[in-house]
Every structure is written in C-alpha cells, then in structure tokens.
Amino acid sequence: MSEKIVEIYTDGACSGNPGPGGWGAVLIYGEHQKEISGGAAETTNNRMELTAVIEALSLLKRPCKIVLTTDSKYVVDSVTKGWVYGWKKRGWKKGDGKPALNSELWEKLLPLLEMHDVNFVWVKGHAGHKYNELCDKMAVAESQKFKK
C-alpha cells in the first residue's frame, strides 16, 4: 500500500511591514480539501508566512508525509538550508550575533517538522499557481479585517 501524501499550500500577506496581516493555507488529502486562514492587527509578512505553516501542520493529528508549497523564501531557506537549526543552537542568534527574528514561532514549528516528513517546495508568488493564489486571496482578505 502506497503512503498517502498530504499537500499543503500556504501564504502570508501584510499591508505595511509591520502592519495588518493575514495568512491562508490549503490542505489536500485524497479527495478532501480544507481551507484555513487568520490574521493579526500588527505583524510582519514573515510572521504570517510562518503562522500559515504552523497552523496547517498543527491540524494533522498523526505523523504524515507532506509536500508543503509556499512562495516564502524565508520559510523554505531557513529550514532547507538549516539556518533555523543554527539559530536555535546559538540561542536564537544569527551567525553575525544579531537576534534571529520570530524565534517563538520557530519554536512552535520545529517540533511539527520533527513529527512530520515535510518536503518544502518553493513557488514564485503571484504567478498563477492555483493554490498559491487561493492562499494569497485568503491572506489578503484576513489582513483587510484589521485595516483601520
């Protein structure tokens, strides 16, 4: 029996950086598709990108094989190039000694990455990718809720 794969698509949006932001995620497993989204009044684009990934992975109740597609170089490179593990080892400091940003979100994400077998795929944003566009639309709609 072949292992089932969960496809996850995520995106974050921010109006001003920092400013009102939103995130969106789509999870696909076989015939099932679930859309989730949320936002914050004062945040950054990278925080929303990370939050989308955390929230999507948090929905999965048991270890899964996942293909996670995002347009966030920050998320993809931080994990696939191992930067985040170095930051954590150095007490959430980057190689130059400056603080690594969003450490509390990375602390939430790392155990989820350990639980699941996650393969990150980067796609160019706003380039017509069906699910990236859907996540972007949800993220922007969430960010609009916080505009004054």
Image (spheres, rainbow, N blue to C red):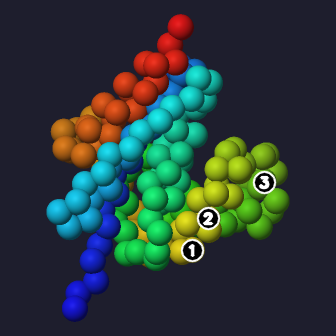
From the top left corner, tell me how far across and down residue 73 is, in percent: 45, 49
From the top left corner, tell me how far across and down residue 62 is, in percent: 46, 74
Q: Residue at x 57, y 40 (%)?
A: 47
Residue receiving disc 2: 110
Give above or below for 139 relative to 41.
below
Q: Is residue 27 visible?
A: yes
From the top left corner, tell me how far across and down residue 131 is, in percent: 24, 46
Question: Could you tell me how far apart the alpha carbons at marks 2 and 3 are, in whole angstroms?
Answer: 16 Å
First reached walking from the N terminus: tag 1 or tag 3: 3
**SS category of the residue bearing label 3:** loop
Q: Is residue 71 visible?
A: no
Residue receiving disc 3: 93
- In which quadrant of the rendered image does the N terminus lie? bottom left
Q: Residue at x 40, y 33 (%)?
A: 139
Residue receiving disc 1: 114
Q: Residue at x 26, y 38 (%)?
A: 134
Question: Could you tell me how far apart the alpha carbons at marks 2 and 1 are, in whole angstroms?
Answer: 6 Å
**SS category of the residue bearing label 2:** helix
First reached walking from the N terminus: tag 2 or tag 3: 3
